[in-house]
Amino acid sequence: MTTVRQHYVPQGFLKGFASQENTPFVWVYDKRDGRKPQEKSVKSQAYEDYYYSQETSSGERDIDSIEKLLAHTVDNDIPPLIKSIQPRPGHPITISPNDKAKLAFFIALGLTRVPSFRNGINDIFTRVAQFALSEVANNDGEFSEIISKYGISAKAKDWVSLRPMVQMAEMIGNSLLKKNWQFYIASENVSFMTSDNPIVIAGSQGMGPAHPHSELMLSLRKDLALVCTPLGTKNIEVFKQSASETRRFNRGIVQAARYKVFADHYSTTTDAFVKKYRSAHQHLKV
C-alpha cells in the first residue's frame, strides 16, 4: 500500500510529548496569527504528501520507497531507545557505541529532513539551473527571445534535495560522535517542548551543524533533553534543571520552530510565548 502522508518529524518521536501517557495526541501551538492551540493526533502533524517521492533512473515516479525505508529503520528504532533512557542527576549514562551512533544519525537526520533544510537545498539547485539557462540564453539570441516571449524559467525538482539530506545527515552524525553529550531532566513544573524544527543549532551564529565547535540541542521527550557540546570525550553527564532553566531551553526550541510547537499541555501563556517568536525561524541560508 502506498504511503501518501509522509512525516518529516516521526510520529513515534512526537508521542514522547503526548498530552497523556500512551496516547498519540499533542497540543499544537502555531506561531501564525489567528491559529489557536489545539490538541491533535501526531499522525496529522509534521508531514507533507509525497514528501520523499523521487524519480527513478528511468524517469518513473517512486512515491514512498524512502518513506518506508525510514519508517522501518531509524523512525522505528529510535523512539524505543529514547524511551529506555533512565537518567539520574549526577550519575553518568552509558550508551552502547551502536546505540549512540544510531541516535546521532537520528538527530542529524532530524535536522536535514525538515522543509527548512530541504527547501534551502532546492533553492540552491534552482539557482544553479536558472544560471545555466541564462548562460545558454546569453549565447543564443533566438533562444533568448523564446525565453523572454514565453517567460521560461528553470526550477529544480523537489527530490534533488533527498541525496544531500542523507549525505549531510551522515556528516553531521559523525561530528556528533566527537562532541560531549549532556542530558537534562526537566523541572517538575515545566515540561520540554519540541517543534517542526526539532533540532536546534545553538552557539555561534552562522556556524554549520557539522562544525567542530557547533552545538546542537533537542528535546528527546517531554521530561528529557540532550545537548551536544563542542569537542569532548567526557562521560555522558546528567543534570536536573530548575523551572527557569527548562523555560530558557524551551525558548530556544520555540525560536527555531518553523510554524508549529508541540507540547503536552494547554496554556494561554505558552501560546503567547510561541506567538512572541512568530518572526524567528531556523532555516538554511542560501
Image (cartoon, rainbow, N blue to C red):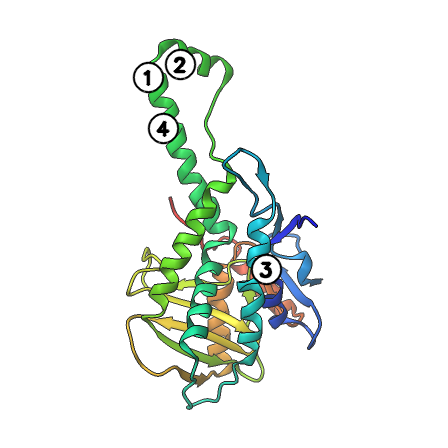
Q: CA distance from mark 4 to mark 2?
A: 13 Å
Mark 1 Cα shell of 10 Å, populated few (<14), some (14-19), many (≥20): few
- Please give the label number shown on residue 131: 4
Picture coordinates of residue 116 (x, y %)? 48, 50
Decide which of tag 3 and tag 4 comes sooner along the chain.
3
Q: Amino acid at mark 2?
A: Ser
Pointers 1 and 2 in contact (C-beta within 8 Å): yes
Residue occupying the far top of the picture: 142
Decide which of tag 1 and tag 3 comes sooner along the chain.
3
Picture coordinates of residue 69 (x, y %)? 56, 56
Q: For the residue labelled by badge 3, is the local secondary structure a helix, a strand or a loop? A: helix
Query: Which residue does the numbered mark 1 point to in the structure image?
Result: 138
The image shows residue 254, relative to residue 90, as above or below, that is above
Quadrant, the C terminus? top left
Decide which of tag 1 and tag 2 comes sooner along the chain.
1
Q: CA distance from mark 1 to mark 3?
A: 47 Å
Q: Amino acid at mark 4?
A: Phe
Instruction: Say which quarter of the image contains residue 183.
Output: bottom left
Residue 93 appears in view: yes
- Please give the label number shown on residue 71: 3
Q: Amino acid at mark 1?
A: Asn
Mark 2 Cα shell of 10 Å, populated few (<14), some (14-19), many (≥20): some
Query: Which residue does the numbered mark 2 point to in the structure image?
Result: 144
Q: For the residue labelled by badge 1, is the local secondary structure a helix, a strand or a loop? A: helix
Decide which of tag 3 and tag 2 comes sooner along the chain.
3
